[in-house]
Image (cartoon, coloured by chain):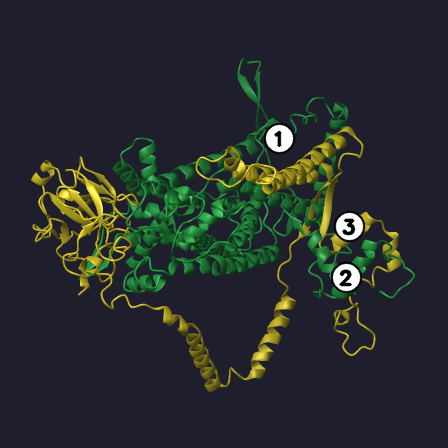
Chain colours: A green, B yellow
Amino acid sequence: MATNTVPGPGQPTTLAGKAALEVDDRLIVAGPVRRTLNKVFPDHWSFLLGEIALYAFIVLLLSGTYLTFYFDASMQEVTYEGSYDALRGVEMSAAYESTLGLSFDVRGGLFIRQLHHWAALLFVAAICIHLLRIFFTGAYRRPRETNWFIGVVLLVLALLEGFAGYTLPDDLLSGTGLRIFSAVFLSIPVIGTWVYFTVFGGDFPGELIIGRLYIIHVLIIPAVLLGLIALHLLILVKQKHTQFPGAGRTEHNVVGHRLFPTFAGKATALLFIVFGLCAALGGLVQINPIWLFGPYNPSQVSAGSQPDWYIGFVDGGARIFPPWEIDLWGYHIPPVLWGALGIPGVLFMALTFYPIIERVLTKDTASHHLLQRPRDVPVRTSLGVMGLTAYIVLWISGGNDIIAERFDLSLNAMIWFGRIGFLVLPPIAYWATYRICLGLERHDREVLEHGIETGVIRRLPNGEFIEVHQPLGPVDAHGHGQLAYGGASVPKKMNQVGGARRAIKGFFKPLEEPAEVQRQAELEARGLEAARADRELTGSGRPSEGGRPSEGGRPQDPRD
Amino acid sequence: MTTTDRPGSGGGAAEAGQLHGGPDDEYSPEQLAAMDRTELDRLGARYDGVEILHVEPAPPIGSPLDKKNTRQVTFWFGLAGLSAVAFLVIYAGSGWFLPDWEWSIGSSTWSSVFTPLLGATMGLSLAAIGIGLVLYVKNLLPHETAVQDKHDGSHFDRVTTGATLMGGLHNSGLPRRKLLRRTIGFMGAAFGIMLVSPLGGYLKNPNTGNPLGTTPWGSEPDIRLVRDDGTPIRPGDQAAGSLATVFPAVENGDRAPDAAVMLIRLRPDQVATLTPAKGREDYGYGDYVAYSKICTHAGCPVSLYEQETSRILCPCHQSQFDVTQGAKPVFGPATRSLPQLPITVDDEGYFVARGDFPEPVGPSFWNIGRLG
């Protein structure tokens, strides 16, 4: 085919076209590429939260690789001779010394180090926000339970990865965190001391742990993360994205923009913005100034030692758990087990198995591709807010010494707040959320039945004042709306139903003719109506003839 | 066309089979050549189950709106390029035609704004590319709304795939050959255990030599208490109400994770209320008491001594210990008293330990009550 000398009909004439033909002759990719470019993505800002996590991960891989070229993950004792005067002559581990070197003696090293740290904070934060979006909209329901499990595993791995990462510099702050970690290992019943000695290669801190954490941080967890993220995305692409209910959106289609160029453009833009944010933070906002902490020494600690934000809730659990040590004939189970491992463990277990719990309780085993608004599932929403409240109480308790110090409160009062708050606030949050959901639901239905409040007050001949309501659709003999609630956002303001013209563009002077804008708006309204009518006729966007299987190569019923 | 004509299924044909998945037999090259680009795009989209519902065209080229939008995008992309250049100039120029970038205490202003400038320029450059792209997509491209079908699993695929798999299993005879099946199970288990068994080399026995129950203080008799600079301490050295962190005068005594001790000189009123733990009445020396500095909750050094209330606070989880009550926990999550070090003075009048701590130092663990 490529041997044609005279271009036949449809044969490429441009250089790029010929090159593309050469490629496709060898790889036969035109079909899959077209399918990919044509893939439709729904458009909603909350669908970009997971992407932020993905892009933060890319930033982490790039900046982390940079750091490995200098960092020396060794606990060998060395004497600092670098350019930071305050620590010159101090004995420290090679890990700490090389981190100081990265910060002071490598051009731009401090910038990349801080960029990496900020990206890590953003990575975990984006995962958490993404998880909340998935949870509160019910996006984890069948068939997406697998991706939910993968997501929870990704979150746990991200936490461990972050912990391993900020422990590597072997400074006083991270060493203190590591010591607490070692106490958690020790607290495990029966095998605790064995785990502790095996992890550290002897008594804490030993001389191995930084090297071990290093390989965990730069190889093992990133490799697993990479694999799971790839799987997460593959499943996402295969299952297609969920969408919020709305005009023309059904369980059997996806309405939005095609990958190329709109979605690809926006996604690339987000990648750059995330990268830019990390870079700006990395340069402008100091983070983890390890040279102020000094090298790790088991007999020293700073007041107000705080882990990175995402470990705070574990620390909070350890702080507020009461001093209850179980003593079984000389065998002990210390409270740090429950505080630092038990409470977070229960929270994560509940998170992991929530899709299954919900399925069993609601007996809803159907596949769902349309999302739910949080208000429409008050029990789930309230449970979510309840869990979130418990998490926030733990998280606040993780910093209770800072709060007590800053606001001049009693530290012990803060701990009691944590202890009582952890038990009392979540149920209150459940109740309050439930009531708010019901209130919002009722208001939606009220607007559908009675129309939008226009703010226009009319005086009737009998002297009675009424407010005029704008119905959203056809009304019955009593003036009540006939529209049923469809799970989509209900307009509550006149402007949302075209009560006002769209603004004329232009900052200093109008760039558009107001009359033209008006004409366009009318055309658009007519066009939308026509499109809606079309859709109702065909049911889905699929043409009635000429449509072919989109998955390609899959035999359908013979048509001839 | 029937399913037997699908690619790759014309087994044994002399002619090369149809190479593409597309309906090349339905649309001849001449037909396709007669279509314009938009038609071809829509045709391909339809073939992929995608219908373009609505296209809102971009502002006409040359219109005031288009000019304004183009200016905006140009501005951001230009700014991105300029910021990147600024980054390069700052990064490479420092120490060349700009002041030195290397920071030290009290050094020039340039070195202290070097890192912030790197962040500001790179951040601005990257963010400007992102903002420019967003504006590009939003204001210069047509907005189209598309809808794509979702497909359920195909019954045909399930049945045929299942038949292939089950056929293979059936032909292997495994369902019938019980002994072979069991042997494979045994082989798999043994092989798996063999693969992970080398990890056993990392196992360390925490009970050989009782490392959890002993500290350097017990390594030899009458070890002196020394400060971190190695100097020993006499009873007259500390002011009443003060606390000093001391270490055993052995090699690396100040590095051991379980050796740090708080030597506290009590005020007279504290001495009056001093109630040592049972059997440890003689552990102190005069108005001095010595407790392990390692918190019994999670192993942090307990450091914050509030002498007014005789309390020692651990900054990690806020466990509080009363030094006049044998350092027993009075608030927070800790459950065990800080172990007390028995002290006395030697012939030269310096503090020495009379032996090791009577119980394990640091966080609790499973067999803490059973250590020999």
Which label sits in the foreground, 1 or 2?
A: 2
Considering the image in quadrants, where does the C terminus of chain B appear?
Answer: bottom left
Q: Which mark is residue B42?
A: 3
Instruction: Report the residue marked by disc 2.
Output: A23
Q: Look at the image and tell me whether residue B323 can be seen.
A: yes
Give the crowd class for mark 2: few <14, some 14-19, many >=20 residues within 10 Å.
few
Report how far apart the C-alphas of labels 3 and 1 lie in the structure. 32 Å
Report how far apart the C-alphas of labels 3 and 2 lie in the structure. 23 Å
Between residue A556 and residue B306, name the one nearer to us: B306
Give the crowd class for mark 1: few <14, some 14-19, many >=20 residues within 10 Å.
few
Q: Amino acid at mark 3?
A: Arg
Residue A6, given in percent of the width and then of the height, sits at: 92, 61
Which label sits in the foreground, 3 or 2?
A: 2
**SS class, disc 1:** helix
> Mark 1 falls within which chain?
A
Asked if residue A255 lies left or right of residue A486, the reply is right
**SS class, disc 3:** helix
Asked if residue B280 lies left or right of residue A299, the reply is left
Residue B245, given in percent of the width and then of the height, sits at: 23, 46
Q: Amino acid at mark 1?
A: Gln
> Mark 3 falls within which chain?
B
Between residue A244 and residue B218, name the one nearer to us: B218
Q: Which mark is residue B310?
A: none
Q: Which mark is residue A496?
A: 1
Instruction: State the image quarter where residue A548 is shown.
Output: bottom right
Between residue A442 and residue B154, name the one nearer to us: B154
Between residue B119 and residue B195, name the one nearer to us: B119
Position above or below: B15 against A25: below
